[in-house]
Amino acid sequence: MSLIDLLTGNTSNQVAEQAENKFGISRNQIIALLAVAAPLVISYLRKKSQDANEAEALNNALDKDHDGSILDDASQAEARQAEGGSILDHIFGGQKSTVENQLSQNTGISIDKIGPILAMLAPVIMGYIGKEKQQNNVGAGGLGDLLGGILGNASNQAQEQQSNPLNDILGSVLGGGQAQSGGNPLNDILGSVLGGGGQQQQQGGGLGSILGNLLGGK
């Protein structure tokens, strides 16, 4: 299953419906957030997996806690929200608040809700990675290539099929994120898409206009 399949499939819609009911945020906003958060999380994990100890720890976590069952039972997302928060703490570390601020500014989701919503989405993203790992029979040493392949395939598919706004979002996100894979994933992805990353500039193009189209001009 490709990343775009995840975003457009039943799981993401069911999780978005849960988050909509819980936080009062529109389903489209939740899915748009997932479309940016998923490649961002995968990029961070890909960078971490370059370290053998981190790769082993990720491999063990995927084997133990992320078998992909959440993709068939989306109710786990809300039940595992606290776990999702811990996952994000580990993945983003000291940059977590920066990530949340940028995502809040560019999705229109208030800063007090962005963290809890991301925490619901994190186990879904990890479950997707875990399922791909199982299906491809990958161990710790192959995680970097697996994660890079997920991003590369999603980028190609998004650029080939720009018929809906989610593909546009992924195409924009991954178009910049892949260019400097040796750098910081936050700067690569947020810098190219989310209003200039660390620079305080609000652009009319990029993710902002795509989200505007997706969210009906909000």
Image: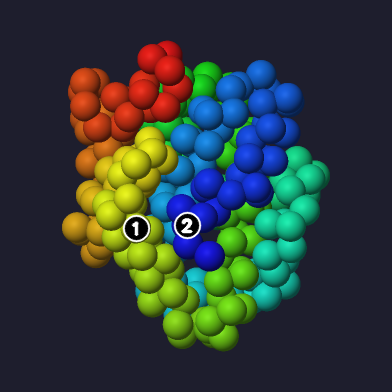
Q: Is residue 18 above or below residue 141?
A: above
Residue type of the residue flagged with mark 1: Gln
Q: In which quarter of the image is residue 206?
A: top left
Q: Quadrant of the C terminus?
A: top left
Residue mark closest to the camera, 1 vs 2: 1
Q: Is residue 214 above or below residue 185?
A: above
Question: Which residue does the image show at 53% across and 65% down from the upper left?
Answer: 1
Question: Which residue does the image show at 59% across and 28% down from the upper left?
Answer: 27
SS for dot 2: helix
Q: Residue 56 carries which label?
A: none
Residue 60 horizontal side relative to residue 78, left or right? left
Q: In which quarter of the image is residue 156?
A: bottom left
Residue 71 on image: x %, y %: 68, 57
Q: Residue 157 carries which label?
A: 1
Residue 30 on image: x %, y %: 55, 32
Cβ atoms under marks 1 and 2 closer than 8 Å: yes
Q: Residue 3 carries which label?
A: 2
Compute the Cα span from label 1 to label 2.
Answer: 9 Å
Residue 97 on image: x %, y %: 47, 35
Residue 218 horizontal side relative to residue 6, left or right? left
Residue 12 on image: x %, y %: 61, 44
